[in-house]
Amino acid sequence: MILGETPSAASTAATLDDLFRRAGVRHPDALALADPPNRQNFTDGIPRALSFAQADRAISAIAARLRGLGLQTDSAVAIQLPNIVESIVAFLGVLRAGMIPLPLPLLWRQEEIVSALRQVGVKAIIGCSRFGQTDQIEIAMQSAVELFSIRHVCGFGPNLPDGIVPLDDVFLREGAEATVSVPRLGPAAAHVAAITFYPDASGLAPIARSHVELVAGGLETFLETGAGTDTPTLSTIPIGSFAGIALTVIPWLLCGGALHLHHSFDPLAFDAQYRAVTEGTVILPAVAVAALAECATFDHAGQTVVALWRAPERVSGAKAWEGPSHLVDVASFGETGLIAVRRDGGGLPPPIPLGPINSIHRAPGAPVVIETSRTKAGTLALRGRMVPAQTFQAPPGQSASIGAYVDTGFACSPAQDPQTLVVTAPPSGTISVGGYCFRQSQIEAAVAQADPKATIVVLPDADLGQRLAGTAADREALQSRLQARGANPLLSGAFEPRHPPKAA
């Protein structure tokens, strides 16, 4: 078991591609990946459903295409796609090519993409023709113009502009390309498997994780769910963050069942998908779990629901779980790490243990998945295999030593039991809107550059955790300026013009 290994045992650990191949060898004709049934409502293409054999061919075709473009081993390849089959195939295809995927949040626009990717010398970017009314491939192209390191823009979807490398044909059996072989020096699982980003005082900091670290993060949740071999999974969490990869990709690879993907939230589409995994695992944002529980949606005793808390300070205020399904709370601490805890018979989320946390429902003698500590400043610190060696807390040019505690910045206090902790507040100066993180100072600076007289504030929100609201003399003009600069739509949306109510 990976979590029980010492660092020197990394040579025997599996890569993500190893895990996929093992599942595919076991059941090549079984369903591996399935699109949201409402896919055409938000992006191009009919819903896809791939067996493990079909997915394997598509992954190999992506890998061969990237190598055929002249990209070298360990090239950084950005991926910005909705929560659809292509996002998983592209992620694994980049890895099979011996390259490093950088999955990007879907709402990022040119400003954030350029800021993040400039730091890592990204060589290619993979996008799609559209998301909703947004021309996603145009955003990728404009970003590439500002990033001289980008040599290729690749895309899924119809009517791609000239110069874009089309990828839809990777799903055609007759178009499948030869599998590439990428030799590695040293333990393959110790190589960087993905880079995600987190806002720190200087901007969007890249966080690199190896295969071992990614698997460790996903294995914790997988063990807490108690999922068996070939268990189906329904995930609404895109892979543009560590939590997204750890909750969506890793448990699927570990159990080898079908992965059903859902993007945003469509009640009818979700209900159809939910009924297909009555004996499986359903992964949702915590706020969606609470809303659906009130409607008695989770009525299958053999099902496990995973609630992702991107605002872990709100876990202690959660309502008791009364449904027949099992519930696992996953508290995500930015890009540092996560803690998964299965609720017991009382239905309320337990406090976070202080010190080592065991897997398999915290059973004594089980392997330690992560350790917690409280800093002198009263913030939560984490250490363990999933915590990256290079973190945004480390001084520039320095790495946090392996095994050292990393400060998450989340304020915490002792619970009634002094051997447990309760998270009480997010990191100072950080804003979290529906899973998208910003630094408040950077948001304020961006607005001031567009209109020095405009103001923007952060307000609490029952669903999103926090939301942005802005005022300006000319809202439409400011909104247009922010959009022209490629600002995140959550920022420009804070200045949505207010229209007076129409007369009856």
Image (cartoon, rainbow, N blue to C red):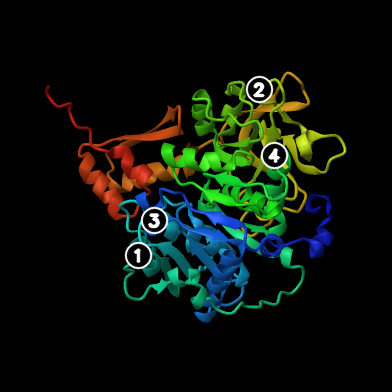
Q: Nearer the viewer, mark 3 or mark 2?
A: 2
Q: In the image, residue 376 lies at what x, y percent?
A: 71, 33
Secondary element at image label 4: helix
Of label 4 and label 2, which has the lower sequence position? 4
- Residue 265 visible: no
Q: In the image, residue 204 lies at what x, y percent?
A: 50, 53
Of label 1 and label 3, which has the lower sequence position? 3
Mark 3 = which residue? Answer: 111
Task: Give the residue furthest to the left.
Answer: 503
Task: Give the residue furthest to the right.
Answer: 365
Q: Which mark is residue 142?
A: 1
State the residue at coordinates (73%, 18%).
Answer: 416
**In the image shown, does 350 or 326 lie closer to the viewer?**
326
User: Amino acid under label 2?
Assistant: Leu
Q: Few, some or many C-alpha atoms within 10 Å of disc 4 (few <14, some 14-19, many ≥20)?
A: many
Whether pointer 3 and pointer 4 mark residues with C-beta atoms closer than 8 Å, the reply is no
Mark 2 = which residue? Answer: 348
